[in-house]
Image (tube, rainbow, N blue to C red):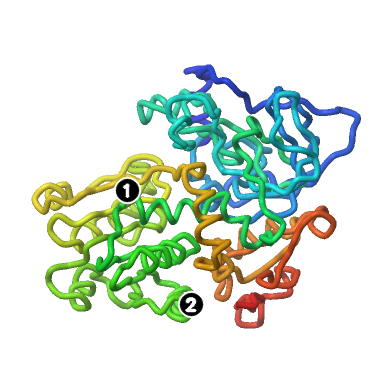
Amino acid sequence: MQTAANAFQSYLGNVGTDVHPEFETNPSGPTMKALAWFGNQDVRIVNAPIPAITEPDDVILKVTASTICGSDLHLYHGEIMTMQKGDILGHEFMGVVDKVGPNVKNLSPGQRVVASFQIACGECEFCQKKLSSMCDRTNNSSLQQFMYGTRDAGFFGYSHITGGYAGGQAEYVRVPKGNVNLLPIPDNVPDEQALYLSDILPTSYHAVVDTGVEKGDTVAIWGLGPIGLYAAKWAQIKGASRVIGIDRVPFRLNFAQEKLGIETINFEEHKDIPKRIRELVGEKGVDVAIDCGTFHEPKSLAHKVQKFLMLETDVPETLNEMLLSVRKMGRCGIIAAYAGFANGVNVGALMEKGVRLIGNGQASVHLYWKEILEEFILSGTFDPTFVLTHRVPLEDMPALYKAFDERVPGLEKVIVDTKFSEEFGKRGKGCPPLSRVEDWKTSTGTAKAQGVN
């Protein structure tokens, strides 16, 4: 798939953009450690050139904290098109400013900042509304234009269908338009509370706000990874009367019950999710359903076969469960990162029930990150560290991808250290001690949670 997708994109040619993924380096200079993709389930730590200021709005960061996201697993499995060997991964990261381009006036070397996972120009009609994920000027992918009719913004470390920008699972990152894509972090906010402003905090908040969760709503959330857990917490903050989380991993189900006090459904035990939801909430159904899961793991034999034969790229089973589970005139939000085409969507239920199906889109980080920082983190209303279970060094990233993919019990969300973390980072009381993946797997295959929450 990757070869065909890259060939087709090459045939179409790149779309013109204001910024570009290519960057200058010093060929004879030092190198950095970075995690790079080389094929299906093949990621490696490599020595890569350190990026230099290439365009006048660039900022070079020394990365002090990175992480792995559930959406990275789509890359790990080759589910996202136009990956190329050697691509540097990672879209959630923070650090200290190392160098700034001549046009960057609002940042200075040594300043702690977090990066948005999307690269916005700051000037187009979408950026003027803080809709940074919809920026028109930073993603050169003609293939995405062909598939969707428009293009998202460029993203860090997420294939060439999002612009081909090098990511943040590395010691250094070049941040194009750094004057708008970096948020300064106050000294009293530790890394483990700031890091997730890059993606999962705004993404989960956007899912709840955009799908319209209101006071008194009953809300069902598919997927209890970090985004699903955060979405459940945001739904509670917005006044939901009941939140039901759906997953199949016992650790995640227990974690959600312990940390948030929500009801849960194990879909390995309850095959008919809409039926089980109505047993819990009554025949009316839930007011809101949000998909925080994954498109690449079909449940039924029919969709396993279709996906294997490439008759569909994505799976509609969660969507169909949501359509049947919500009440008439209910709302369904999709924040899970779907990428292509799915067969057998229950369009009849969508229309006849008057369901409001909302493609939440990639969350516009710039729209939310200041609000989340100032109103929820600094006030103590939302402590992002409740999902944090482990802390590992960058060198362990290949093993971490494997463990994360296997959903090793005890593992929920991590913070990743680089060689700059000790000198320039600010780890707080909510940060687990540094450990190695090979050490925290017990004889039963369980990752011993290191978090202090």
Secondary structure under badge 2?
helix
- Residue 1's disc is none
Q: Nearer the viewer, residue 123 or 80?
A: 123
- Judging depth in this view, the residue of 186 and 335 nearest the camera is 186
Residue 186, above or below 264:
above
In the rendered image, residue 130, in percent from the top left (x then y), is placed at 47, 37
Tag 2: residue type? Lys
Judge whether 55 appears above or below 242 on screen.
above
Closer to us: 121 or 320? 121
- Indicate left or right for 274 with 195 as reference: left
Residue named by callout 2: 259
User: Residue 434 lies in what quarter of the image?
Assistant: bottom right
Residue 271 percent location from the top left of the image: 27, 71
Looking at the rendered structure, the secondary structure element under dot 1 is helix
Residue of label 1: 306
Q: Earlier in the sequence, mark 2 or mark 1?
A: 2
Q: Residue at x 33, y 40 (%)?
A: 341
Q: Is residue 129 left or right of residue 283?
A: right
The Cα atoms of the two marked residues, 2 and 1, are separated by 38 Å
Tell me the residue at 20%/61% (across/down). 326
Residue 395, visible in the rendered structure: no
